């Protein structure tokens, strides 16, 4: 039981957790993977939650290394026009957290350029999150716990005082390895895959609030 502790920080992945963008990325990376790796069907699902560098290291080496810049240019153009809709109920949920004194942070494998696109379309993100951590802020990428441990330190919080919200397998593993409570979003992967790597699972934030989260956190 954690009744003597305070729930200090909520740490959110970005795509599939704050914004309902994973289906769009599946389309983009599906096209790239079929173009460059037709021998690896479903590769776009294997790379979910990975940084761009990790993706390139997995599939764009050797003769394909010269193609990386072309992929980056296509990705940048894609992200500038993609739709950034919040996961249902997120805005009310994060507002409820902040009203109860919980600090909030984005902890994403995306880079700062991607966040610039987010700020242009959602300038309010600068106010609803206390910290924004991107791939440039980490020594190691998910599934390493490094990103979430660094986020906790930004708030002078112990891992057990934080909760992670994730959707990708790499992200869920990262939160578990950090020793934090993990809430699994079912926006990207099915329940059977998310449940073993999370303490609770939700489809969206519509019926989720601080009171319910706090009770679940205390009961772990």
Image (cartoon, rainbow, N blue to C red):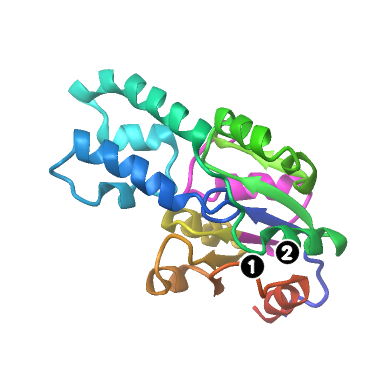
* Residue 147 figure quarter: top right
Circle 1 crowding by C-alpha within 10 Å: few under 14, some 14–19, many from 20: some
Residue 156 colored magenta? yes
Q: Which residue is drawn at 26% across and 47% down?
A: 43
Span highlighted in magenta in the image: 136-164
Q: Which residue is drawn at 49% across and 48% down?
A: 144
Answer left or right for 138 relative to 192.
right
Q: Where is residue 137 in the image (x, y as percent from the top left)?
A: 61, 34
Residue 94 colored magenta? no
Q: Which residue is drawn at 66% across and 32% down?
A: 120
Q: Where is residue 57 in the image (x, y as percent from the top left)?
A: 32, 33
Answer left or right for 101 relative to 158.
right
Circle 2 crowding by C-alpha within 10 Å: few under 14, some 14–19, many from 20: some
Could you say whether the residue bearing mark 1 is in a helix, strand or loop? loop
In the image, residue 92 above or below residue 48: below
Q: How many labels does the image show?
A: 2
Answer left or right for 205 relative to 35.
right
Q: Where is residue 148 in the image (x, y as percent from the top left)?
A: 61, 50
In the image, residue 2 above or below residue 83: below
From the image, which quarter does the C terminus lie in? bottom right
Residue marked by disc 2: 93
* Residue 59 figure quarter: top left
Residue marked by disc 1: 205
Q: Where is residue 86 in the image (x, y as percent from the top left)?
A: 62, 54
Q: Which mark is residue 63?
A: none
Task: Give whichever of 154, 53 is nearer the camera.
Answer: 53
In the image, residue 31 above or below residue 102: above
Dot 2 and dot 1 residues touching (CB under 8 Å): yes
Q: Residue at x 44, y 53 (%)?
A: 170
């Amino acid at each position: 039981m954690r009744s003597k502790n305070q729930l200090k920080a909520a740490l959110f992945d970005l795509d599939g957790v704050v914004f309902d963008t994973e289906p769009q990325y599946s389309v983009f990376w599906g096209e790239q993977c079929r173009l460059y790796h037709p021998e690896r069907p479903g590769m776009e699902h294997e790379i979910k939650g990975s940084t761009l560098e990790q993706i390139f290291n997995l599939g764009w080496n050797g003769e394909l290394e010269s193609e990386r810049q072309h992929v980056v240019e296509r990705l940048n153009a894609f992200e500038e026009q993609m739709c950034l809709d919040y996961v249902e109920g997120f805005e009310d949920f994060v507002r409820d957290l902040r009203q109860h004194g919980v600090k909030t942070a984005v902890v994403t494998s995306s880079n700062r350029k991607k966040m610039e696109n987010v700020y242009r379309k959602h300038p309010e993100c600068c106010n609803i999150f206390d910290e924004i951590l991107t791939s440039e802020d980490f020594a190691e990428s998910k599934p390493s716990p490094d990103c979430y441990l660094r986020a906790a330190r930004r708030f002078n919080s112990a891992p057990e005082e934080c909760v992670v919200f994730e959707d990708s397998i790499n992200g869920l593993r990262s939160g578990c390895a950090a020793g934090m409570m993990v809430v699994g979003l079912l926006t990207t992967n099915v329940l059977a895959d998310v449940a073993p790597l999370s303490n609770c699972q939700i489809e969206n934030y519509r019926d989720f609030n601080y009171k319910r989260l706090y009770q679940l956190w205390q009961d772990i």
